[in-house]
Image (tube, rainbow, N blue to C red):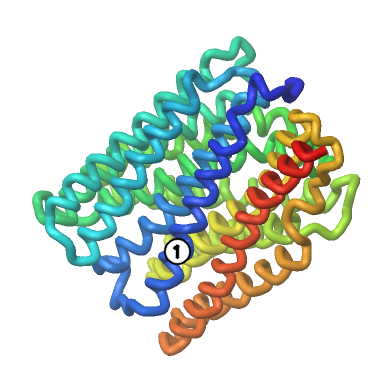
Amino acid sequence: MYGLTLEQAPPYKVPLFYYLAGVAYLLVLSLLLVFLHVKNRYDEQAIAMTHILTLGFFTHVMMGTLFQMVPVIIAEVYRNVQFFSKLLFVGLNLGIISFSLYLLGANPFFGVFGAASVIVSVLFFSLYSLQTVLKTEDKNPFVKTIASALFFLSLGAILGGVSLLQYSGKMGGVWLGELHIKIMIFGWVFLLFSGVSYKILSMFYVAKEYPLMIKNHFYSVVSAVLILSIFATFLEAEFIQTLLSIALACVSGFFAFLTIVILKQRKRARTDVTVNFFYFAMGNLLIGSLLWVIALVFNLHLDIVLGILFGLGFVYGIINAMLYKIIPFLTWFHLSSSFVYEAEMGKVIELKKMKIQFYLFVCSYALFLLSSLWPVLVMPAASVFLLSSLLLVFNVMSGYLYYKKMIIKALKN
């Protein structure tokens, strides 16, 4: 870890505005879940809500995190970050809104414009970040893993665009959409999470380092399995696809189990909402991986349950943990660097509100799982998720309000 300075880090508002935009989309999703009823995951409304979650919430938070973490971890600054982050922000949001409106019934023009805007924005961010990451002379495991994740983000964006042609009837089948989902979950989110975990667990939780062999080679194993899966998909080698999916599930489950063990053995084993989110996310990744293997071996159709386990349980859970850990640190770091030394990380977001939001989320998650058996529970699940999302929005905004309050107080003194 390099010494943290404001010269390396982007301005405070850069990552925070991405976080605020992300939770705003989460609020929109929560309202849609309450008022819209979808028949299956291939409905236009279901696809719209999926991308509001993945592009609106997940992607904004992950981009904001990389804008903050890359410079302070590898000491390589994003070039003209204020200008390019704003340009990216505008392009990405125009794309998400237009694409979502199209899927919810608007003019087809919105679909073309939205898809093009999203793909260009995601590709730009991937190349922009990849160029920044690869500038460092120290090609350590964090750098290699993040670079791999950015490569798969680019590839996933291209596959997403082509899969839209499938969906619109210009190509046959839905197989490319399935490949797009796999690349995004395991190539982008999972690899990014593993790379960030190498730093965050030791930095924030005083936990043991991951084994050196894991840090040095894990990204290459996941990357190899995903690349082979792409070839197997295009060659329509179904048996090989199944074997590779089982391998990917085993690798993911192993990493989840290892992370749980490392967290259990941490030196500061204090109660922490973010640790609860970590355990919850890793538990879902582990259970989801095992269930995926069972579904593949016995040819079971568990798409909805696996979607909840991986999407809501793992990805949403881990991103929520990152928000609650990074925002207090980010706020304290910028205040301290501005000579506001009375700032305290523990006061940025109220612990009680974080706990309430966690329990509301877990309750909504349980109801969503049960709704796969009893659809009547979708409405209660969506309503509780809306409450959880409202509280998450409030908690994220608390970071910015605390920052403004401390700056104004310092100026008065």
Please, what secondary structure does the residue beneath circle 1 have? helix
Q: Is residue 174 above or below residue 391?
A: above
The quadrant in which residue 31 appears is bottom left
Whole-percent x, y for residue 213 in the image: 69, 29
Check disc 1 and give the amino acid type.
Gly
Can you see residue 217?
no
Of residue 112 and residue 371, the one placed in the foreground of this image is 112
Give the quarter of the figure containing the N terminus.
Answer: top right
The residue positioned 88% from the left and 53% from the top of the image is 269
Q: Name the residue furthest front.
A: 412
Classify residue 277 as left or right of residue 246: right
Whole-percent x, y for residue 388 in the image: 58, 70
Classify residue 255 as left or right of residue 112: right
Q: Residues within 10 Å of mark 1 (few under 14, many from 20)?
A: some
Whole-percent x, y for residue 333 in the image: 74, 35
What residue is disc 1 on? 307
Q: Is residue 114 above or below residue 75?
A: below
The residue positioned 47% from the left and 58% from the top of the image is 24
Classify residue 39 as left or right of residue 192: left
Can you see residue 351?
yes
Give the quarter of the figure containing the C terminus.
Answer: top right
The residue positioned 61% from the left and 24% from the top of the image is 71
Q: Is residue 99 above or below residue 126?
A: below
Whole-percent x, y for residue 10 in the image: 59, 28
